[in-house]
Amino acid sequence: MPQLPIPLARIPEVPGFCEPRSGKQPGFIVNAQGGWSDALADGILVEVNLGHEDQVQPGDFLTVWRESPQAGQPPQVLGEIGVLTTEAHTATGKIVATRYAMRVGDHVEIR
C-alpha cells in the first residue's frame, strides 16, 4: 500500500479498555502494510473490509477490538484507525493509536 498524504485533523482519545461496542457496522482488518499480520502499531497502514457503501468515509475513525480470552468478559479495545481512503467495501486507514498490538483479523467498528 502506498503512503497517502491525507492528514487526519483530530485524533480522538482511544475508548476505554473494556468500553461497550457502539453497535455500528463491524468489520475486520484484512491486510497490513509490508505484509505484516501481527504486532501492528501506530503509523502502519491497514486495509479493512468496510467502505463507503458501509457508511465509512475518509476522516472517520474505527475502533479496533478483540474478543476477551475469558468467557463472559467484554471485548478488549486495542486502538484506533483513521480512515484515509475508501472504495465500495474496503478502506485504507492508518493506525493512529495503539493500546495493545493489533493483528490482521482483529475486529473494527465504526466509531
Image: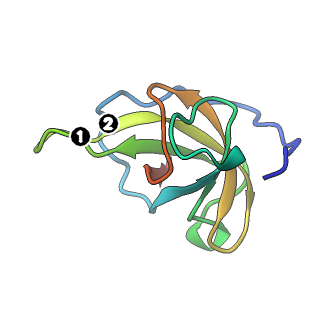
Residue 31 lies in what quarter of the image? bottom right
Check disc 1 and report its element: helix, strand or loop: loop
Q: Is residue 94 left or right of residue 73?
A: right
Residue designated by label 1: 68
Taking the spot 58% from the left edge, 31% from the top edge, the residue there is: 41
Amino acid at the residue labelled 1: Ser
Q: Earlier in the sequence, mark 2 or mark 1?
A: 1
Using the rendered image of the protein, determine whether residue 51 is visible from the camera's viewpoint.
yes
Residue at 50 percent of width and 50 percent of height: 104
Closer to the camera in the image, 2 or 108: 2
Q: Residue at x 78, y 53 (%)?
A: 1
List the single residue furthest toward the right.
Answer: 5
Answer whether residue 12 is visible to the viewer in this image.
no
Density class for disc 2 (Cα within 10 Å; few <14, some 14-19, many ≥20) is many
| Location of residue 111 in the rendering, given as x and y in whole percent from the top left corner | 50, 47
Q: x, y (%) of residue 15?
A: 43, 31
Q: Amino acid at mark 2?
A: Gln
What is the distance, in whole Å, between disc 2 and disc 1 at their CAs? 6 Å
Residue 64 % position (x, y): 46, 43
Q: Which mark is residue 89?
A: none
Regarding mark 2 in the picture, which secondary structure is present there? strand
Foreground: 32 or 67?
A: 32
Q: Which mark is residue 76?
A: 2
Badge 2 vs badge 1, beta-carbon distance below 8 Å: yes
Residue at image position (52%, 28%) is 98
Instruction: Judge from the rendering whether residue 42 lies leftward or rightward of residue 59; answer left or right.
Output: left
